[in-house]
Image (cartoon, rainbow, N blue to C red):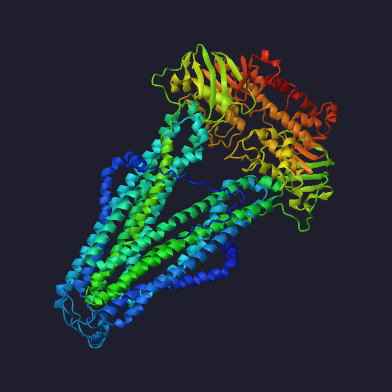
């Protein structure tokens, strides 16, 4: 109906919107979620559906009360021979529809009453005992309202309980699954996106599942009952309603796709604006440094005017459709009213019935629209369900084997890698045919340029990643048969980027061992050269650190993370260049302490510093995923190659 | 700033659209009146045509009944679109003005305010102000017209019923007042729980390495479940409060309608009213109830607009500290002579950061600034870039006071290579081109070759079209620095500003950067906050700073001559290393 208008979109920083891939999933997907999360509440849900059916049809009952009042209590007169009205007195022929009306004669029109009263007074005639009947119907009317209202209240409360419980269950499942998934998954899915799945997607799913079930039931009941009533009471008028209601729904339906498209474009432009601003303000230094604010203002202006056009286009479509359908609906109901009036004048219908039919017809439009809307909601819902299922069905790569064996204690032989290759998905290999030995009680060092796969290697040894091919063994046992819990307890990895948890410094240090004694904590922080710094803080170990550890410098965070690992007293320590942000002196002291406390223990150390490598028993050089050199310091130092170059450079 | 002043300032943005606004307002009044007509028409049909049999009224009434909705639909379209246009233009203008203002603000301002917050104000608050200034104002106007009309109509039809109706409205508003506090409190507490919930998830996901290395998945999940089920109760409470309110509202609404209708019918029985009048009366009563609630929320809405407006104005009130003087001159290209004469600088009066700094730099010289953290090295760079103005003394470029040169032309003289390299989330080519717009790909590649990054770029599948940043390729520090060096090479600036990286680069990057630097520094005035010993040794002037003073100054060879010199000591302790540690 309203064509989506393409406009010029070649604006910097406004990349074209990626089309949704159209995977909707199928009804079975929907059913799977209903089974999993709504099935436990099926009886409550059925009850709710029953109640909303009653409520959906209650409108007609209300309208029926009105009809009864008009036709049977007030006996609102209808002039038979219009031109005689001026005399203020006429007889009314018996009506086929309502025998009782025939008993009433000589009634002046109600609307004239005041005029007539003023002219000399004449009492109106109504049904016998009209006051009593009116009171009775009033009581019935109020009673119905109260009943319907309390039923609705109850149904809503039940819906809230069902909805919230199923939301919680969904979140529970998703969160559990996300934590189980391997680090490789976390690397390729940003935390913001996963968070949105767990929080907002689940919220939408719950709401829309309820909408599809409850609203559809209510609207269907309302339409079916309404249509039946219309046909029974006056089929000629029903035809008008039946013609107009689908037309009305079609106007909405036909333009909905266009509107949604424009709305998506507008949202996309909006998020582009957010992106542009945060990026530019982040780099305001560069903009000012290069004197480019004029240019940047122009960019912003351009994107802003695209947004302006998007929003206005969206408005034009929405408002246009709304007004056209308003015209259809009001024309139809008003026609029904006028035709009804003429029928009343021709005595083929009572006034009360006319008003009743008019009300019923007007009430049909809303539910009909709702029903067409449900199909859209359903499609949206499937898209989101698909996203959730992607998480729920993701294979957990790293899980305990059924016949798991605890990590050998003490470690006798060591850790051996044979022909280990690793690649993300189908990408280029990060590690190729890596074989190395980490003998028990020895320190082994891995060096190499950045991006050569050192961190990946450590992740494989700590079983955070699963190698694509090749084998990793611990004292001859395949690593994937080792109980993960015991592996994590005995082996500690200190990552290059220290990760902080919201909480106190103590909480952060005792993360791996919450029950540690203060003396043990202090020993760990002293070894990591962190104790004095902590003691200089106002509340010492109870100082709060933010999520990103904003109040600590990079070096302080690295030391804290080292202390965290040392506290668990691991047998195998994996260090990922974890002193890179420290000054030379502190680094030196930490190296010394480490070599003292880790004496006789096994360590795999990634570093850029030759001074650290010299403390290790054996050195591997990793370049582009391949091991290019291996040997002790003495063996490698004279040989041309990476190690020799680095050594020369750092001791020049 | 006074409230009235704030409003007048923001309303100033609406001024260009005042004629459109007037049209919209006029249309709104007409529309509101039109919306009130159908009940009267229906009454007329029932009373005049049906009851009194004045059939000649039917045709005109029928035409009116059908044409009034059509007329109001058409006018409604014009009104809504006019309103949307004004509102969106308003947002557009406010945002542009604010963005321009923000770009002119000093780095000190950016140090104090997070970018996220600024983005929210720029995008969010301007929208809030727009909505309330346009849509809500129109809503209020239309409500006012409707309410006045409906009250007059109801009193005219039957003052007794109208009094009952007023009673019902009071019950309506009381219900709102009683419930709204409860709802707001419940909502607030569950939003707090939600924030904790999502904060926890985010923290866990961001620290997934730590969670996994310590095998804490289970404990973390239990903690999550704790917050999850705690929030469940709060959410339900809030939703139940909401449900109670809306069901109460519905109940009062329906019962009020019922009471009015049956009272009206009783009056019909007594002959005091006609049935048509009852129908019309109840129709008006319904239209009065909703505005009654909306009126009671107006105070809250104005509170919201007040808050959003405050936040916008707070930004507008920030005065850009560095602005062009009225007689600022445009410079074409500077030679690159820089002179510091008795320069002093402080952020806060009485706490000088730079004290009595004198330095004469001739074209083509390389100045290495060294000294411990906080000695004022970066401040010197900021002064040269005129991120800040000197507090006392003068800073001259080619003999001109820096404050007499227009900002844009001054800043286009510099090439900048910083520790946190300033890259944008666009392609590599675009990033390099930021130095000189409109340069060809060949020029970009030539610059990249000089910066020793070309070979690396060519190994990427998308080459120079590779996108950088959070959604694109993550580069190492060394690679990022070399891209900014390429940018500086392309720009061919008169003066190079550089802050050397301290953190360990791998040896390949290290050498590549060193070679690139040598090429860039040739015949170009350069200020370098230096950490690399080779840079320092090769500099034309070494400035050793301490607490804002120049402690020692001169060439490497000269400084090494000073028997007990600080530099000599520093150099000797670092012999054999690549970097000077701070």
Q: Is residue B237 left or right of residue B342?
A: left
In the rendered image, the residue lying farthest to the top is A412
- Quarter of the picture containing the C terminus of chain A is top right
Residue B379 in view of the camera: no
Residue A78 in view of the camera: yes
Q: Measured along the vertical axis of the image, is residue A594 above or below residue B177?
A: above
Given residues B180 and B492, the one toward you in this image is: B492
Q: Position of residue A419 (x, y in %)?
A: 54, 18
Q: Quadrant of residue A362?
A: bottom left
Q: Position of residue B30 (x, y in %)?
A: 45, 73
Given residues A363 and A462, the one toward you in this image is: A363
Residue at the image point whose x is 37% and y is 62% from the top: A248
Q: Measured along the vertical axis of the image, is residue A62 above or below residue B154?
A: above
Residue at the image point whose x is 52% and y is 21% from the top: A461
Q: Is residue B32 left or right of residue B175?
A: right
Q: Is residue A254 left or right of residue B52?
A: right
Given residues A18 and B168, the one toward you in this image is: A18
Residue at the image point whose x is 41% and y is 35% from the top: A392
């Amino acid at each position: 109906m309203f064509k989506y208008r393409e406009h010029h979109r070649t604006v910097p920083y406004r990349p074209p919107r990626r089309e949704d891939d159209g995977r909707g999933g199928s009804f079975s997907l929907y059913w799977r979620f209903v089974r999993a999360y709504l099935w436990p509440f099926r009886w409550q849900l059925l009850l709710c559906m029953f109640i909303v059916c009653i409520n959906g049809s209650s409108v007609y009952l209300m309208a029926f009360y009105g009809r009864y009042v008009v036709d049977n209590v007030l006996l609102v007169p209808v002039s038979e021979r219009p031109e005689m009205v001026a005399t203020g007195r006429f007889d009314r022929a018996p009506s086929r529809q309502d025998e009782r009306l025939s008993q009433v004669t000589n009634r002046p029109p109600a609307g004239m009453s005041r005029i007539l009263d003023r002219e000399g007074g004449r009492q109106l005639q109504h049904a016998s005992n009209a006051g009593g009947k009116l009171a009775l119907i009033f009581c019935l009317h109020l009673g119905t309202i109260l009943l319907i209202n309390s039923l609705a209240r109850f149904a809503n409360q039940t819906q809230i309980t069902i909805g919230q419980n199923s939301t919680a269950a969904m979140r529970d499942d998703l969160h559990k699954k996300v934590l189980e998934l391997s680090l490789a998954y976390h690397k390729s899915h940003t935390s913001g996106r996963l968070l949105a799945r767990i929080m907002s997607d689940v919220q939408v799913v719950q709401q829309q599942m309820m909408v599809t079930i409850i609203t559809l039931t209510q609207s269907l009941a309302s339409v079916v009952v309404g249509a039946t009533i219309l046909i029974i009471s006056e089929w000629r008028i029903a035809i008008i309603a039946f013609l107009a209601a689908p037309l009305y729904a079609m106007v909405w339906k036909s333009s909905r796709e266009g509107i949604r498209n424009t709305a998506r474009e507008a949202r996309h432009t909006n998020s582009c604006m957010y992106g542009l601003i945060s990026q530019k303000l982040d780099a305001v230094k560069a903009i000012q440094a290069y004197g480019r604010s004029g240019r940047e203002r122009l960019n912003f202006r351009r994107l802003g005017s695209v947004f302006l056009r998007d929003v206005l286009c969206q408005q034009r479509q929405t408002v246009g459709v709304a007004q056209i359908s308003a015209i259809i609906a009001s024309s139809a109901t008003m026609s029904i009213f006028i035709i009804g009036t003429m029928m009343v004048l021709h005595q083929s219908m009572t006034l009360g019935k006319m008003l009743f039919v008019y009300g019923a017809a007007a009430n049909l439009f809303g539910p009909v629209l709702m029903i067409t809307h449900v199909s859209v909601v359903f499609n949206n819902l499937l898209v989101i369900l698909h996203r959730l299922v992607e998480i729920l069905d993701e294979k957990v790569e790293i899980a305990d084997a059924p016949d798991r064996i605890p990590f050998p204690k003490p470690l006798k032989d060591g850790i051996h890698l044979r022909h280990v290759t690793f690649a993300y998905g189908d990408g280029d290999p990060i590690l190729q045919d890596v074989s190395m030995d980490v003998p028990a009680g020895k320190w082994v060092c891995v060096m190499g340029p950045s991006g050569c796969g050192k961190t990946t290697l450590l992740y494989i040894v700590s079983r955070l990643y699963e190698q694509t091919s090749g084998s990793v063994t611990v004292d001859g046992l395949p690593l994937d048969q080792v109980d993960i819990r015991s592996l994590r307890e005995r082996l500690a990895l200190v990552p290059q980027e220290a990760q902080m948890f919201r909480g106190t410094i103590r909480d952060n240090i005792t993360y791996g061992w919450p029950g540690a004694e203060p003396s043990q904590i202090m020993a760990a922080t002293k070894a990591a050269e962190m104790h004095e710094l902590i003691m200089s803080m106002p509340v010492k170990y109870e100082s709060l650190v933010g999520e990103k550890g904003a109040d600590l410098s990079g070096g302080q965070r690295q030391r804290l993370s080292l202390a965290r690992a040392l506290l668990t007293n691991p047998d195998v320590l994996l260090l990922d260049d974890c002193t890179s942000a420290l000054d030379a002196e502190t680094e030196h002291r930490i190296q010394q302490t480490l070599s003292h406390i880790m004496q006789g223990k096994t360590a795999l150390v990634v570093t850029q510093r030759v001074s650290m490598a010299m403390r290790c028993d054996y050195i591997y050089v990793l370049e582009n995923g391949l091991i290019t050199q291996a040997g002790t310091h003495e063996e490698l130092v004279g040989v041309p190659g990476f190690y020799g170059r680095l050594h020369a450079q750092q001791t020049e | 700033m006074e409230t009235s002043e704030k409003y007048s300032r923001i309303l100033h943005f609406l001024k260009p659209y005042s004629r459109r606004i007037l049209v919209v307002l006029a249309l709104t009044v007409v529309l509101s009146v039109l919306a009130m007509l159908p009940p009267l028409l229906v009454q007329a049909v029932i009373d005049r045509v049906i009851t009194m049999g004045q059939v000649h009224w039917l045709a005109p009434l029928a035409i009116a009944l059908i044409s009034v909705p059509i007329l109001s639909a058409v006018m409604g379209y014009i009104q809504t679109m006019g309103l949307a246009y004004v509102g969106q233009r308003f947002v557009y203008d406010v945002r542009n003005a604010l963005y321009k203002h923000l770009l002119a603000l000093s780095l000190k301002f950016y140090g104090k305010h997070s970018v996220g917050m600024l983005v929210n104000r720029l995008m969010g608050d301007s929208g809030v102000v727009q909505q309330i200034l346009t849509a809500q104002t129109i809503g209020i106007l239309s409500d006012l017209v409707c309410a006045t009309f409906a009250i007059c109509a109801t009193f005219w039809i039957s003052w007794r019923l109208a009094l009952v109706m007023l009673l019902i409205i009071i019950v309506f508003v009381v219900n709102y007042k009683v419930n709204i506090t409860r709802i707001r409190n419940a909502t607030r507490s569950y939003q707090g729980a939600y924030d904790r919930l999502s904060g926890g998830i985010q923290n866990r996901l961001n620290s997934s390495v730590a969670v996994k290395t310590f095998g804490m998945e289970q404990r973390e999940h239990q903690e999550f479940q704790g917050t999850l089920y705690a929030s469940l109760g709060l959410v339900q409470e809030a939703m139940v409060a909401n449900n109670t309110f809306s069901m109460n509202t519905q109940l009062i609404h329906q019962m009020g309608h019922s009471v009015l209708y049956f009272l009206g019918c009783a009056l019909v029985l007594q002959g005091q009213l006609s049935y048509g009048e009852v129908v019309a009366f109840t129709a008006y009563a319904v239209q009065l109830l909703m505005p009654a609630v909306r009126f009671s929320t107006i105070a809250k809405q104005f509170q919201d607009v007040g808050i959003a407006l405050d936040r916008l104005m707070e930004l507008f009130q920030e005065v850009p500290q560095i602005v062009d003087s009225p007689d600022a001159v445009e410079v074409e290209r500077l030679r690159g002579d820089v002179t510091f004469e008795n320069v002093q600088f402080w952020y806060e009066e009485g706490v000088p950061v730079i004290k009595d700094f004198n330095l004469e730099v001739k074209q083509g010289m390389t100045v290495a600034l060294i000294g411990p953290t906080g000695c004022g090295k970066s401040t010197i760079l900021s002064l040269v870039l005129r991120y800040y103005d000197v507090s006392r003394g003068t800073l001259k470029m080619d003999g001109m006071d820096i404050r007499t040169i227009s900002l844009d032309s001054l800043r286009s003289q510099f090439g900048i290579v910083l520790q946190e390299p300033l890259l944008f989330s666009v392609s590599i080519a675009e990033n390099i081109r930021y130095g000189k717009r409109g340069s060809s790909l060949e020029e970009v590649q030539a610059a990249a070759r000089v910066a020793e990054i070309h070979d690396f770029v060519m190994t990427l599948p998308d080459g120079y079209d590779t996108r950088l940043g959070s959604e694109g390729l993550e580069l190492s520090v060394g690679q990022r620095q070399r891209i900014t060096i390429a940018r500086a090479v392309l720009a061919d600036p008169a003066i190079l500003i550089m802050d050397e990286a301290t953190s360990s680069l791998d040896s390949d990057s290290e050498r590549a950067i060193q070679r690139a630097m040598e090429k860039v520094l040739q015949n170009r005035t350069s200020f370098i906050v230096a950490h690399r010993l080779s840079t320092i040794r090769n500099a034309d002037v070494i400035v050793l700073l301490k607490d804002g003073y120049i402690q020692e100054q001169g060439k490497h060879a000269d400084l090494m001559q000073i028997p007990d010199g600080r530099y000599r000591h520093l150099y000797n302790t670092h012999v054999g290393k690549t970097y000077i540690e701070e």
